[in-house]
Amino acid sequence: MKKLAIGQRTYSNRSLHGQVVHELGKRIVTGDIGEGAVLPNETDLGASFAVSRTALREGIKVLAAKGLLASRTRTGTRVRPRTEWNMLDPDVMAWRLSSSHPAKFLQDLVEFRTAVEPLAAALAAQRATPTDIHAIAAAYDDMVMAGTDVEAGVEPDLRFHQAIFQSSGNELLAPLGTLTEAALSMSFRITTPDLKNMALKLHKNVLDAITVRDPEAASDAMHQLLNMSFETSSELLDEAGE
């Protein structure tokens, strides 16, 4: 598995309409613009972003596809109910993590991961090919090489988890690693050098269980890793006053 360019799944902000997507999307997801709110008319909204109507419309189309907005001829563009948002969209997940209440998002993320990653690890222990196991081990080795450098460890950590999803042999589970890429890469940054050393040991337990083809041990090891991740992240956010 090739090394990843972190954030490659999120929508590009290089274009003007891409900038509208990220700025307007973040305002909606973080609650600055509430559910049910009607956006200003195109002229006023375009002026507030300093973009043309064309760029604005393209941005709104993207956000509509993510489930955030709905446009109607007579009623204008309205923010859709939160229950209709695509919460697994990489951008929506990233915007949620940047909100004023990241601890709630991290709890949701870990609960979601707890529902799927232990199963993925167990299936990987049963189905992973030698090439798959090599990819997981290579990602782990790169995590070790990164040492206590938090930023350097993000990419191999993400690759480790994505390799396990891919090794599950389940075509419904496999895409989840890429769907959650943006959120995971950000959550992996909420740590300290000491906690990284602890996490490395737990990652090694997952790798070892998959390597020896022990599904139960692989599932248990992943549970332990996820529990540690949530507990330590929550503590750090509490200390930071989040």
Image (cartoon, rainbow, N blue to C red):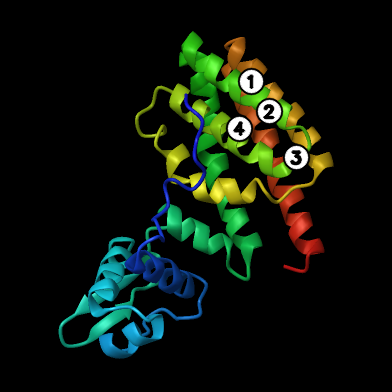
Q: Secondary structure at mark 2?
A: helix
Mark pair 4, 3: CA separation: 12 Å
Q: Quadrant of residue 117?
A: top right
Q: Does residue 58 lie above or below 42 as drawn?
A: above
The furthest residue to the right: 194
Q: Residue at x 72, y 27 (%)?
A: 145
* Earlier residue among tags 4 and 3: 3
Query: Which residue does the numbered mark 2 point to in the structure image?
Result: 203
Q: Quadrant of residue 236?
A: bottom right
* Earlier residue among tags 4 and 1: 4
Query: Which residue does the numbered mark 3 point to in the structure image?
Result: 149
Mark pair 4, 1: CA separation: 14 Å
Q: Secondary structure at mark 3?
A: loop
Mark pair 2, 1: CA separation: 6 Å
Count the marks: how many? 4
Mark 2 near mark 1, Cβ–Cβ under 8 Å? yes
Q: Position of residue 12 (x, y in %)?
A: 39, 56
Q: Which callout, 4 or 1, points to the residue nearer the camera?
A: 4
